[in-house]
Image: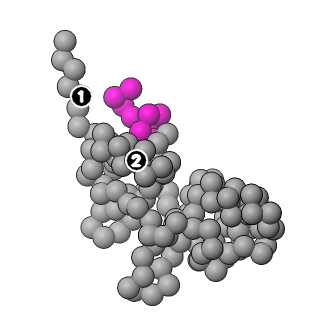
């Protein structure tokens, strides 16, 4: 029995849709954008060329709005985002993507190729969109 699996990259399983948001947007505006675009994470835009991207996910709204007992109108994205966003190279083996995401405790990360974000990869993608399962 051959137990060696075929190579599959982050690019092979990623979702191509990537949505950006301004860090000054309110949590309410960000969630409305997530609903409209049907995404579970937003990439927070850079403020200047030397800045880095951030990421805001559902869990951030739980911690920064609901648990903090604030309204979604009084919290800005920059207050609850994770920055810098941890990204994975497009050609990274899904084995290492899974390892990285679980070690840092993230459910998803942007996929980077040639200095640009080209999609998002999630723990769910690694299983549900993986042809090896």
Instruction: Characterize the local packing of mark 1: few (<14), some (14-19) or many (20 or more) Cα atoms within 10 angstroms.
Output: few
Q: Which sits earlier in the primary sequence, circle 1 or circle 2?
A: 1
Q: Are marks 1 and 2 in contact (CB under 8 Å)?
A: no
Relative side of 36 to 130, left or right: right
**Relative height, residue 22 to residue 8 (above, below):** below
Q: Secondary structure at mark 1?
A: loop
72 or 9: nearer the eye? 72
**Visible in this render: residue 13?**
no
Q: CA distance from mark 1 to mark 2?
A: 22 Å
Residue 33 is marked as none
Residue at 22 percent across and 20 percent down: it is 3
Residue highlighted by disc 1: 5
Q: How many marks?
A: 2
Location of residue 95 in the rendering, given as x and y in whole percent from the top left corner: 30, 39
Relative side of 96 to 54, left or right: left
82 or 8: nearer the eye? 82
Stretch of the chain drawn in magenta: 125-133
Residue at 30 percent across and 45 percent down: it is 96
Location of residue 23 in the rendering, given as x and y in whole percent from the top left corner: 59, 77
Residue at 35 percent across and 69 percent down: it is 116
Instruction: Characterize the local packing of mark 2: few (<14), some (14-19) or many (20 or more) Cα atoms within 10 angstroms.
Output: few
Residue 103 is marked as 2
- Location of the C terminus (image quadrant): top left
Q: Secondary structure at mark 2?
A: helix
Residue at 48 percent across and 49 percent down: it is 105
Location of residue 27 in the rendering, given as x and y in whole percent from the top left corner: 70, 68
Location of residue 89 in the rendering, given as x and y in whole percent from the top left corner: 30, 57
């Amino acid at each position: 029995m051959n137990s060696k699996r075929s190579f599959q990259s982050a690019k092979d399983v990623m979702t191509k849709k990537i949505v950006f948001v301004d860090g000054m947007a309110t949590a309410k505006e960000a969630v409305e954008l997530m609903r409209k675009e049907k995404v579970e994470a937003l990439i927070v835009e850079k403020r200047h060329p030397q800045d880095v991207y951030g990421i805001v996910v559902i869990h951030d709204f739980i911690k920064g709005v609901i648990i903090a007992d604030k309204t979604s109108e009084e919290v800005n994205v920059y207050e609850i985002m994770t920055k810098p966003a941890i990204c994975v190279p497009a050609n990274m083996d899904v084995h290492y993507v899974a390892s990285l995401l679980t070690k840092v405790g993230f459910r998803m990360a942007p996929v980077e190729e040639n200095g640009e974000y080209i999609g998002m990869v999630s723990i769910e993608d690694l299983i549900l969109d993986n042809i090896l399962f």
